[in-house]
Amino acid sequence: PGEDPASEMGPLITAEHRAKVASYVTGAREQGARVVVDGTGYTVPGHEEGFFLGVSLLDGVTPEMDAYRDEIFGPVLCVVRAGSYEEGLALINASRWGNGTAVFTRDGGAARRFQLEVEAGMVGVNVPIPVPVGHHSFGGWKDSLFGDQHIYGEDGVRFYTRGKVITSRWPDPADGGINLGFPSGH
């Protein structure tokens, strides 16, 4: 429930939007993807009239599918598999969307290559959601905030440029690495 302070995400805004997001889950199944988790039947006890949709996970999504081609503004995660770095990079760069992407690696050279070659505005290295934090807003500091950027100096230049943000996290080599549960091929 949106009014519960412990909730991290409330319902979708309208019945039409909920139906549209749910249609990506059912459509993906019809188009050949595997629905690993189907949140379309999710309900919140005591809130039957809300436009709730549970988390859904789609695997085997391909670029021809609606769930891949459209931005889904709802709790649906699509897994698209690539056989190589080059194939994965080509998939990302061929997409009409360029919001954010991430790579998980212990190889600094591979990370550097990815952040230089990928065509996306926010790039995560060992960070799943590479959303940077804004520094200051247009009005100054503290309570004199208006907007999310200063218009002077570097922010003014950035306003007219196409930036790329890299967010990285490197685990301690002694921790054994990041295990995503995929076969390693070794």
Image: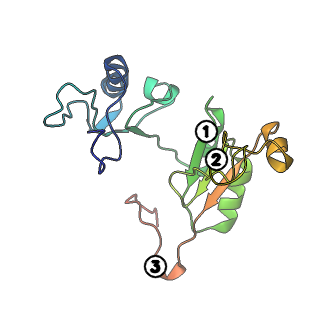
Q: Residue at x 83, y 49 (%)?
A: 154
Q: Nearest to the eye among marks 3 and 2: give it.
A: 2
**50 or 97, which lies in front?**
50
Q: Is the C-beta separation of discs 1 and 3 under 8 Å?
A: no
The residue most toward the left is 46
Q: Secondary structure at mark 3?
A: helix
Looking at the image, residue 151 sits to the left or right of residue 28; the answer is right
Q: Residues within 10 Å of mark 3 (few under 14, many from 20)?
A: few
Distance Cα–Cα, label 3 vs label 2 = 27 Å
**117 or 49, which lies in front?**
49
User: Considering only order in the chain, which callout, 3 or 1, is on the residue closer to the N terminus?
Assistant: 1
The percent position of residue 119, horizontal first and vertical second, equals 69, 41
Label 1 amino acid? Asn
The residue most toward the front is 143
User: Considering only order in the chain, which callout, 1 or 2, is on the residue closer to the N terminus?
Assistant: 1
Disc 1 marks which residue?
99
Q: Residues within 10 Å of mark 1 (few under 14, many from 20)?
A: few
Looking at the image, residue 113 sits to the left or right of residue 186; the answer is right
Disc 2 marks which residue?
122
Disc 3 marks which residue?
175
Label 2 amino acid? Met
The percent position of residue 71, horizontal first and vertical second, equals 50, 29
Q: Is the C-beta separation of discs 2 and 1 under 8 Å?
A: yes
**Number of disc labels:** 3
Looking at the image, residue 62 sits to the left or right of residue 105; the answer is left
Image disc number at residue 146: none
**144 or 134, which lies in front?**
144
Q: Residue at x 53, y 73 (%)?
A: 171
Quadrant of the image for the N terminus? top left
